[in-house]
Image (cartoon, grey):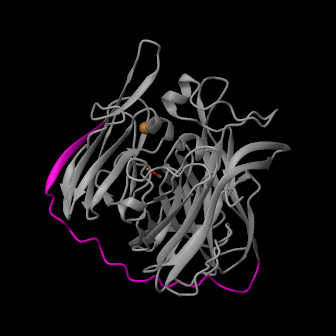
Amino acid sequence: AKVWGATALEDMNPDAKIVEVNLAAANYDWDFEGHTVKMFAYNGQLPGPLLQANVGDKIIVHFTNNLEEPTTIHWHGMRIDNEMDGNPRVQDPVQPGETFTYTFDAVEAGSFWYHPHVNSHEQVDRGLQGSIVIHESQPPAYDTERFLIFDDILIDPATGILPGFLKSHGEEMHGRFGNRLLSNGLSRDKLAATAQKGEGERWRIVNTANARTMTFKLDGATFRVIGSDGGLLPQPYTTNYLQVAIGQRYDIEVSYDKAGTVKLLNLIPTATNDGKVKLVEYSALKVEVADSTNEPREVQLPVVAELPAREIDQTVDVELSGQTDAQGHIAWTINGKVNAEEFLFTFKKGSTIKMRLKNLAGPEHPFHLHGQFFTIVDQKTMETSQPGLKDTVLVPGMSTVEIIAFMDNPGRWMAHCHILEHAALGMMSELVVEE
Ligand code: C2O
Ligand code: CU
C-alpha cells in the first residue's frame, strides 16, 4: 500500500510477515527559506521516513546513532514490550556511533509516530520525528491515503539560526512555540496535492509540535473522522473543527463532491495590535481537485467492535502542577514530584483505572501515557469530541479531564506531558503494570 507524503523505509526481509529496516539519526543541513539550518534527521529526511507494516507483522529496526549525543526511539502509541519503548530509564540510551536493534510486534492497526526520548525537546524540534502506519488486514479502499505531519519551528528568519533551547521564561512556561508552521517538513502554503472529483481519501494526521495545540478546518470538501490514536472507530463522526493535541492522531475521510481548490486550514490564535486574539488561517495542505464525471462513492469501512464496557477497579488522581524558584525558573510536577524517581502508581495487569487528570497550574497539558490505551470520559472542555481509544489527551488550563485507562500491557511506562519543555522541566513520571 502506497502512502502519500512520506518515503517508506525499505523492507529488507523477504518474509512477508517481517518488516526489517535500517534507520540512522545524524546531523542534517536543512535547506529552508534560503538558509542552511542545522537540524537532525532520520535517514537524511525531514520528517523521517515512513515505517509501515501490516497488523500482526514483526518489525525489526536496526538503528544507528550518528548524532553527537545519546538518543533512543519511542514508538508513540504502539503497545509493545517496554524494553523496546525507548524509555531511557529502561533502555540505556544509544551512544554516538552505537547501534541498537528494536524488535516489536505490530499488535494494532492504526496511525502512529516515532521520535527520540532523550533531550526530546531539542531532538524532536530539530527534526527527529517520523510516521508509522500499521495497515488493517482489510484496509478500506480509498483512492489515496496521505500521511500529514504538522509541526512548527522557531527560527530566526534573517539567519536561519534556531534560538537556544529553554532559554526564556516564555519557553519554560508555555513550551517552545515556533514562528513557522511545517507540513511534512515544508513551510506553510507549500504542501500541495491533486485529486479528482468523486474520489475519497484517507488522511492520517499527527501534531508533532513541541508546544502547539492545532485546530483544523477543511474548506471545499466534506470530511468525517474515522480513526483515533487506537485505530479505526466503531462509529465515524462528523465535526467542523478538528482539534489535535500534541502527539494525537486522527484519521479522516475526505470526499470530493466537486472540482476546485480544497484547503486544510490550520487556525492559529494570533495577537492583534489592539491586544485581542484572532484566528489566522494558514493552509496546511492544498488539493487541486480536477473535474470528472464520477460521483462520490461510499467506501466500505471494516466492522470495528464497540469498546467493551469494563468495570472500574480503582480511581486515582493525577495532579499536574508547577512551582517557581527564587530565580523565577519553573519546575513542572506530577503529584508534587519533579521528574519523579519513584513510580507514580502500580497496577495489576488487566485492571481498569479511572484517572482524574487535574490541571492545577499554568497552561494546558497534553497528557500522554505510554504502552496502554484509554478512553476520555469528560469531553465538555474539548472543542471536538474524542471517541475511541486514545494515548494522549489535552487537559486545558485549570480544569479536570477524566480518562479510563486499560492497563493491559505489563511493564514500566512513562506518563508525562507532551509539551516537551514541560516534560524536560519535570512533568515526567512512570507507572508500573504488574504481570
Ligand atoms: Cu510521544 Cu513519551 O512520547
Ligand atoms: Cu504540560
Magenta segment range? 291-319
Q: What residue lies at 73% left-to-right and 86% top-to-bottom?
A: 293
Identify which residue, 17 or 272, lies in the foreground.
17
Relative side of 167 to 189, left or right: left
Q: Position of residue 101 (x, y in %)?
A: 51, 65
Q: Position of residue 168 (x, y in %)?
A: 58, 24
Asked if residue 218 can be seen in this view, the reply is no
Q: Position of residue 28 (x, y in %)?
A: 73, 50
Q: Position of residue 170 (x, y in %)?
A: 55, 26
Relative side of 182 to 241, left or right: right
Residue at the front extreme of this rendering: 98
User: Which image quarter holds the N terminus?
Assistant: bottom right
Asked if residue 381 can be seen in this view, the reply is yes
Residue 147: quarter of image: bottom right
What secondary structure predominates along the stretch shown in magenta?
loop
Give the mark count: 0
Residue at the top extreme of this rendering: 326
Q: Indicate yes or no whether the magenta region holds residue 5.
A: no
User: Which image quarter holds the C terminus?
Assistant: bottom left
